[in-house]
């Protein structure tokens, strides 16, 4: 995955109000970064953690950094921007890079189904059954090397799973 601009390392000071994170850059400056993740991020938002930020110079954006990754400093990174997995998977599906879905030529995002639900991607191909693909950004980590989903009970998630099952 390539980001629009090179990422810069920082240390997390604290995350608050779901979408804000105070961070310390390597030069010692303290900044506030946007955290594009409304989840609890249990196990990923501990003060002192090494994180990676994406700088931006967009005058329309209030904050000049976006928090993109947690660096577990053991060779593992965890993405925290919930919009990234859908973008990455869409590109992989369209380029037919996932063997299980390589036979599908039509990739449609955000398709309505059931009772007022949407699937992240509907894959279709004559002669094959439709493939419903749901993407989840996993941010719950209670022990190193383990990722869990969901990170909290959610009525919307329960409804969504029921629709998928049907």
Image: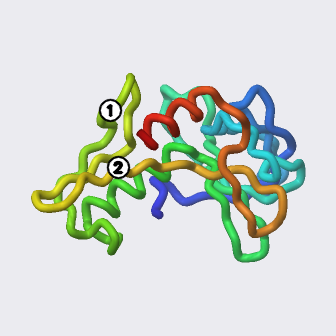
Q: Is 106 placed above or below 97 here?
A: above
Q: Which mark, by number, is residue 132?
A: 2
Instruction: Answer with the quarter of the image where residue 119 lies.
Output: top left
Question: Residue 36's spot in the image, x, y percent?
Answer: 60, 38
Q: Is 156 placed above or below 73 here?
A: above
Q: Earlier in the sequence, mark 1 or mark 2?
A: 1
What residue sits 77% from the left and 56% below the top? 141
- Tell me if mark 2 has few (under 14), some (14-19) or many (20+) residues whose alpha carbon lies within 10 angstroms of its own: some
- Looking at the rendering, in which quadrant would you find the C terminus? top left
Question: Residue 28's spot in the image, x, y percent?
Answer: 84, 51
Residue contact between numbered discs 1 and 2, judged by CB atoms under 8 Å: yes
* Between 162 and 144, the one nearer to me in the picture: 162
Q: CA distance from mark 1 to mark 2?
A: 10 Å
What residue sits 20% from the left and 53% below the top? 124
What residue sits 33% from the left and 47% below the top? 121
Residue 99 relative to residue 157: left or right: left
* Between 69 and 43, the one nearer to me in the picture: 43
Question: Residue 70's spot in the image, x, y percent?
Answer: 71, 57
Is disc 2 placed on a helix, strand or loop?
strand
- Tell me if mark 1 has few (under 14), some (14-19) or many (20+) residues whose alpha carbon lies within 10 angstroms of its own: few
Residue 31 relative to residue 3: left or right: right
Instruction: Answer with the quarter of the image where residue 153 lies.
Output: top right
Question: Residue 91's spot in the image, x, y percent?
Answer: 33, 58
Q: Which residue is mark 1?
A: 113
Is disc 1 placed on a helix, strand or loop?
strand
């Amino acid at each position: 995955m390539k980001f629009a601009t090179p990422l810069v390392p920082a240390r997390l000071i604290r995350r608050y109000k779901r979408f804000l994170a105070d961070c310390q850059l390597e030069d010692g400056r303290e900044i506030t970064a946007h955290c594009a993740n409304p989840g609890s991020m249990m196990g990923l938002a501990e003060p002192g953690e090494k994180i990676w930020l994406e700088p931006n110079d967009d005058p329309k954006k209030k904050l000049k950094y976006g928090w993109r990754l947690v660096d577990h400093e053991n060779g593992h990174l965890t993405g925290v921007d919930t919009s990234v997995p859908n973008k990455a998977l869409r590109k992989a599906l369209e380029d037919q890079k996932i063997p299980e879905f390589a036979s599908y030529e039509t990739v449609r995002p955000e398709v309505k189904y059931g009772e007022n639900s949407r699937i992240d991607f509907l894959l279709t191909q004559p002669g094959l059954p439709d493939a419903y693909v749901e993407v989840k950004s996993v941010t719950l980590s209670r022990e190193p090397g383990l990722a869990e989903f969901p990170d909290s009970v959610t009525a919307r998630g329960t409804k969504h799973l029921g629709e998928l099952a049907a």
